[in-house]
Amino acid sequence: MKKLVVTGALFFICGCASRLYLPAAPNVQKARQADPGITLEQLQAARKLYAIKCSSCHNLHLPREFTSAQWPGILDKMQPKAKITDEQKKLLLAYLTSE
């Protein structure tokens, strides 16, 4: 039974994550407006982090569901609940606002 629950949770996470955009070069360019040193690999890692950390408590929101001005406040509120570091929050913000 435990194996079934874990498998179901992984399927749910992967299913939701598949709707998230995959970062590409144009997203890096947009993210570099706020963080000049960000890389494609970091945006891709942020996507995975978002899928894992945020879906553990609630359904994922697509990045475009909120504006670039709204995401910082949302992440400030969620940071303690998700137990993410300031650096992880910075990466998540770059991902969520670069679509």
Image (cartoon, rainbow, N blue to C red):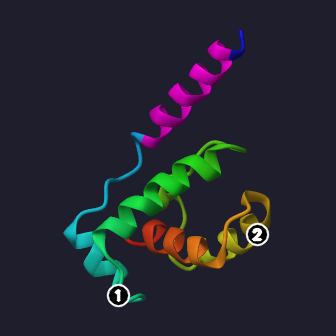
Q: Report helix, strand or loop for mark 1.
A: loop
From where the camera sits, is residue 99 visible? no
For residue 14: magenta?
A: yes
In x, y percent, where is residue 23? 30, 61
In x, y percent, where is residue 79? 72, 68
- Determine the image quadrant of residue 29: bottom left
The part of the chain drawn in magenta is: 3-17
Q: Which quadrant, please, contains the N terminus?
A: top right
Question: Which amino acid lies under the numbered mark 2 shown in the image of this protein?
Answer: Lys
The residue labelled by disc 1 is 37
Q: Report helix, strand or loop for mark 2.
A: helix
Q: Nearer the viewer, residue 26 or 91?
A: 91
35 on left or right of 8: left
Callout 1: few (<14), some (14-19), or many (20+) C-alpha neighbours within 10 Å? few
18 on left or right of 29: right
Q: Is residue 12 above or below residue 79?
A: above
36 on left or right of 47: left
Q: Is residue 19 above or below residue 91?
A: above
Residue drawn at the location 47% of the way across and 34% of the way down: 14
Question: Residues under labels 2 and 1: Cα distance?
Answer: 26 Å
The residue labelled by disc 2 is 77
From where the camera sits, is residue 83 visible? yes
Q: Which quadrant, please, contains the C terminus?
A: bottom left
Which residue lies most toward the left here?
Answer: 25
